Image: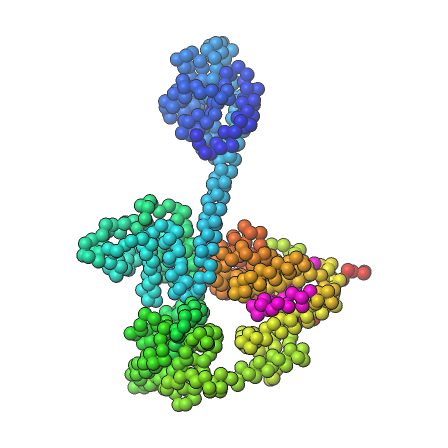
Amino acid sequence: MSADLHNLQTRKNIGKARDLLHSLVPRAQCFCFYDASRECAWSSDGADDYEVDNFMADLPDEIVAEGAREGHIRRSLNSGRTLLVLEVTADDGDRIGLLVAVFSRNAGKSSSFNPKMLADILRPAVDLIGEGLVVARELEQVRRLSNDAEKELALVYEVDEKLHGTSRSHAGLAQLVGQSGRYLGIAYSVLLIPGKRIRVSATHSSWKNVNRKVLDRYLVDHMLPKLEDKRWPAVFEIPGIEGQDGAPDSGFQTLLSPIFDRHGNLEGVMAQLGRVNGSAFNKSERRFMAHIVRKIEYVIEQSFDAMTGLMNRSGFEAQLQESAKALREPGVAHQLIYFDLDNLQLVNDTFGRDAGDQVIARFAGLLEEDLSRQAVVSRLTGDDFCILLTNADQEAALELAHLVRDKVQALRYLEGDRSLQITTSIGIAEFASRRSDIGRALTTARMACEAAKDHGRDRIEVFDDQNLSMIRRHDDMQLVARIQQALDEDLFELLAQPIVSLRDDDAPPNFEVLLRMKDSDGEEVASDALFSAAERYKLMPQVDRWVTSTTLARLAEHSDAIESTRARFSINLSGQSLSDDEILEFIDEEIRGNAVPATALCFEVTESAAVSNLAKAQALIGELRKRGCSISLDDFGAGLSSFAYLKNFDVDALKIDGSFIRDITDNRISESMVAAITQVAKVMELKTVAEYVETEKTRQLIAKLGVDFAQGHRVGRPLPLAETLATFSRSARPSTG
């Protein structure tokens, strides 16, 4: 029976059709409906009629076509009964099925039997049945699509749950490769990106006879070119590859997923080889791999430098986080080797920036030469590089540093008859259990490198724990002192930036409260530097309290306007504040003391802070929502575990990570990620906010993707909070004239 007729299979609908048809032509014994495949979908009397079924199955298509032109078909059966057949069509003329009216022997032979008149009488009912079937078919299609989408969404959630905590690093890629292979029931999974020297594999069953080197080479040399015109995971049959013992292994079905760089160029392949259960890959599993590949592409894009192909700072810090787990073991230590090119600026000034880029690329290639498997190299910033040497002592780090320094001494930039010698200053610092903070480890290595520069460049310095001048950087201390002064003397400035609805022009006003600070010269301090220093010296709880207290005091002055317009103001809470056991009591006191409705407040918590303080974040979010406050999860999507832990937080809105919005109009991965986040948010009935909306093109695209709110210079620039509130109150004041 056709699935398209699902709604007509119920007794209720069959009864309605029977009553309608019999009221129009009471002389008919019964009515039968045959679908497009000539299968009886239903009969008005509910009985099987094999004679009618056999006749309809054998009725030639040309007779049906002729009957359609004439408006009906009249035929007599061997039993003497008469059939009247009418075509049931959709609005576009496509045949849906055939309606058969069955008449008794006497009725069909009567002189009053007029098939044309009967067909005309039945035609309106037939048309109504056709419309109903079309609707039923469309509803069934929607139901199937909805079920498929629900299954795939559940699959995504399941994978994300298992990938909770996956980082932007090689370790993160390993989890993606391993988990996807286990889910699909794969014997062997491998990710290959030759240009970035990425090879991650996972074996999920006994494949003792597989020569992985030969297999990898075959995938790169023979299969990767076949993916040039593919944008979707594809299934291939790979022939037997020579095994470890020299005997060829049998061939196997393989699911190959192309990996593209940020410019849309094919750069690698994710291969799932050999189904353990021997079954074929279905469409749902291919869509699943497309989801995994988007995550892999995001990890690579976010974690690797476009110019050199080396890991960038974000990816490197994630790798340090992963490596720090081993430091719990006694006697384990890592080494950080920090490099700074001494005279890159001179190359740029003399030969141009392209020449400087060439030097950087050559130096990056030099660093990658002869590296051991336990070494990870990164380009942190312009001409700053760092190598993580895991499970190594200082002697091993010094040996590698001297090797690199010797190689660099032969590095020159030549152009015509002019040349410049390239040198590098190198700093070494231990990354051990007693000094396991990531920021501190990198800082100490950088301090040692700067000491090498101060001592004449082209040198190697090892961080000395007793040399306090390496730690207490003058600029950091100045900034910290300035922050403390601003806290003590209320020298901070509060701004308010509009958060504008893309769906409802009459939505209540919405603003984010932003913190700014000026240095001793009256110049605004960069926000990144401000918050980085405050976090490093554990000042963020004080900063958050100042912002909360000052904001609520300002809001209290305009409480009537806020209440009448249902305006809402967002305040950021840092990860350090989430760990503050007294922060909830402080917020309660400020709300009561200023008589500001809790519904006017939204607290923003970053994704990373919430995950790092999972239990306390859950508790604080729950208590704030009980009081009527809203909660927004900021920088959502920055981590690969976002969907997994989202279910653990009772929030109202997701602020999509700015890295996706900044380049969304030029980056298909960012667009796909925003679309996915928006889809999940709608399923969970959460609002979405896009920051860094700086152009009209960006605003239009995010609106098309279903984002609810926009924030950025295109929709509203930050203005002083006091000025915003004054303007806001004036506009909310009722007219007296």
Magenta highlight on residue 48: no
Outermost residue to the front: 330
Q: Which residues fall within the magenta stretch?
A: 566-588
Q: Quadrant of residue 461?
A: bottom left
Q: Nearer the viewer, residue 468 or 705?
A: 468
Would residue 318 appear left or right of 653 to someone viewing this image? left
List the single residue furthest toward the left: 246
Q: Is residue 310 rendered to the left or right of residue 558?
A: left
Q: Note whether 346 is above or below 179 in the view shown.
A: below
- Residue at 49% x, 37% y is 140
Q: Residue at x 57, y 81 (%)?
A: 479
- What x and y, as percent, mark residue 694? 55, 65
Give coordinates of residue 45: x percent, y percent: 50, 20
| Quarter that holds the C terminus | bottom right
Choose top left, top right, bottom left or bottom right for residue 346.
bottom left
Q: Is residue 721 left or right of residue 660?
A: right
- Quadrant where the N terminus is found in the figure: top left
Residue 522 lies left or right of residue 330; in this view the side is right
Q: Residue at x 73, y 65 (%)?
A: 592
Q: Position of residue 593 (x, y in %)?
A: 74, 67
| Foreground of the two, 73 or 83 | 83
